[in-house]
Image (cartoon, coloured by chain):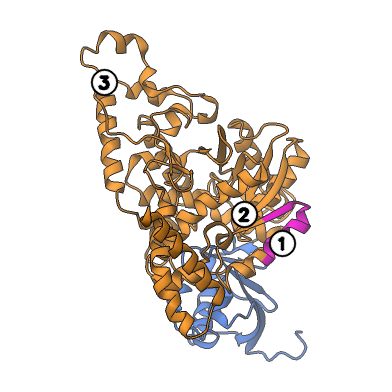
Chain colours: A orange, B blue
Amino acid sequence: MPPSPCALCHTNRALILRPKDHSKLCRQCFLTTFETEIHHTITSTSLFTRGEKIAIGASGGKDSTVLASVLKTLNERYDYGVELVLLSIDEGIKGYRDDSLETVKRNAQQYGMELTILGYDELYGWTMDQVVEQVGKKGNCTYCGVFRRQALDRGAARLGVRHVVTGHNADDVAETVVLRGDLPRLSRTTSIVTSTPSILTTHTNIKRSKPLKYAYEKEIVLYAHHKQLDYFSTECIYSPEAFRGSARALIKNLERVRPSAILDVVRSGEDMAKLVPGSDEGCGGTCSSSVPVAEEEEGGCGNANANGRTAGGEMASIEQHLAQSEVAAEHNLEVEVTTSSVNGAQNGSVPFTSGKKGRKNKAQPVPLRKLPKQVMGQCKICGYLSSQEVCKACMLLDGLNKNRPRNTIELGYEGQKKDQSINGVASGIEKLAVNGV
Amino acid sequence: MAASKEDDTISITVEFSGGLEMLFSNERKLPLSIPAKDDTGARTNVAYLVNYLCENAMKDPKKELFVLDGTVRPGILVLINDADWELEGEEKYEVQEGDNILFVSTLHGG
């Protein structure tokens, strides 16, 4: 094939075929176009505010590395006036996270950003290596996902940051849309912004956003390649090759057949999400009828193992939401909800029931059914936002800690891991004290 | 490099990144000398190269992580001299002396 010229500058040789529109671009035009589109996403959704301090959830992988690089570029080019810092979570997985954290440390220097690393051991008293030692390699992704979700929020609170950006890309969002049948989550998955009211600093919302949500994974990898970014890529040793036979494979196959399919799925997800009453899209994520997002967002590590697995009790919450939807249907509320702006972040807190005041008042002889809906509360152990008495992380930790003394005594006989057995004994004592009261 | 080359082989560089190198004994860069023509006498193309890599360079038995249904697994990008292989004719691209062919996985996480 004869080399084609770039569709934009018409001079350089095209090296990139864009998946979304099949345009052929040269290296420089591609890099600029990619950056400009992210800029457009940021400005059209008013994602950032001047003076804001923003933590980039950084893993050292391609997505977060590209995110950090692009945000630094855009912040300088368009003078957003935001302060960018890196926040990394150390799950405590030897041979995986310790290597990728080295990449993050280099990135911190390359981009001149402050870096904070927060470890699971520090937060929860358990590293993932220790968790796997105890629970085995099945189900450990659940622990990791639940722990990570809180860890980013806690890290942000510690840094005094109220906005965390993550590197979720269009493929991630599309995968989750395909994977997740339940509507409430669809909204959080597709919404560019979600917020987690945090208890760590009272009355503070920690906003989460994904500026790369319309960016193809392919283009992210190409951007990293053509900009020669330093990123780390490997599989987590506890969920190797999770992409096999997964929704991820489906997405990639779709892309091969029709590259625009990924964005189509993302858009469909957004459209469907708008039909869900009480969703983030509908009410800006802060109204009381929305289920707290604290524990329920994406699995985090972006693989099918973690995403596909769902904890018990979830069916119940789906049912609750279906019930909520039915009620909404009775009151003809969908229309109002769907017409609300996509720009969820700016909608303020309008409860969905107030969407159509006039109609609501005259056509409601029956008072609103008391719904068994989830209410935001606080975990009675750690204080983290939770719809249950005890948050998922504390439930998982409780299970781990209950088993620890027995486990550590065995280890103690072998004379290993002294520090671990001390921890175990300590938590055992706490348990006894509680029981004794 | 053309000076010492035999007529029936071509020298190229194959690179792996994005986690794909793990399937190739962690080699990120592989200088290769491959036959200039395949068994039928046709000039060596990328399809031939991919098959050649599976048989000669890949120690890892998990071939399906590289090749699926007879072609490069969806989610793996192929860059021929830094250009997307879709611009070059994909598998039908005839490999030239001195080519740099890069396989990048987008499937691996960080």
> Where is residue A337 drawn, in percent x and y?
39, 24
Q: Looking at the picture, tell me which residue is in the foreground, B100 or A143.
A: A143
Amino acid type at image mark 1: Lys
Dot 3 lies on which element?
loop
Q: Quadrant of the C terminus of chain B?
A: bottom right
Tell me how far mark 2 sits from mark 1, CA to CA. 13 Å
Mark 2 crowdedness (10 Å alpha carbons): few <14, some 14-19, many ≥20: many
Amino acid type at image mark 2: Ser
Q: Quadrant of the N terminus of chain B?
A: bottom right
Tell me how far mark 3 sits from mark 1, CA to CA. 54 Å
> Where A283 falls versus A379 (above or below)?
above
Residue at coordinates 43% horizontally, 66% vertically from top-left? Answer: A242
Amino acid type at image mark 3: Leu
Residue B70 visible in this rendered orientation of the protein: no
Residue at coordinates 50% horizontally, 51% vertically from top-left? Answer: A149
Badges 2 and 1, same chain: yes
Tell me the magenta residue range.
A102-116
> Where is residue B70 drawn, in percent x and y?
41, 74
Q: Quadrant of residue A39?
A: top right
* Sequence-first disc among 3 and 2: 2
> Where A322 falls versus A149 (above or below)?
above
* Sequence-first disc among 3 and 1: 1
Chain bearing tag 3 is A
> Where is residue A418 drawn, in percent x and y?
55, 77
Residue at coordinates 43% horizontally, 53% vertically from top-left? Answer: A394
> Where A167 falls versus A400 (above or below)?
above
Task: Give the main secondary structure of the magenta stretch.
Answer: helix
Dot 1 lies on which element?
helix
Query: Which residue is denoted by mark 2 in the rendering?
Result: A64
Check if mark 3's residue and mark 1's residue have beta carbons within 8 Å. Answer: no
Query: Which residue is denoted by mark 3 in the rendering?
Result: A368
> Where is residue A213 drawn, in percent x and y?
54, 45
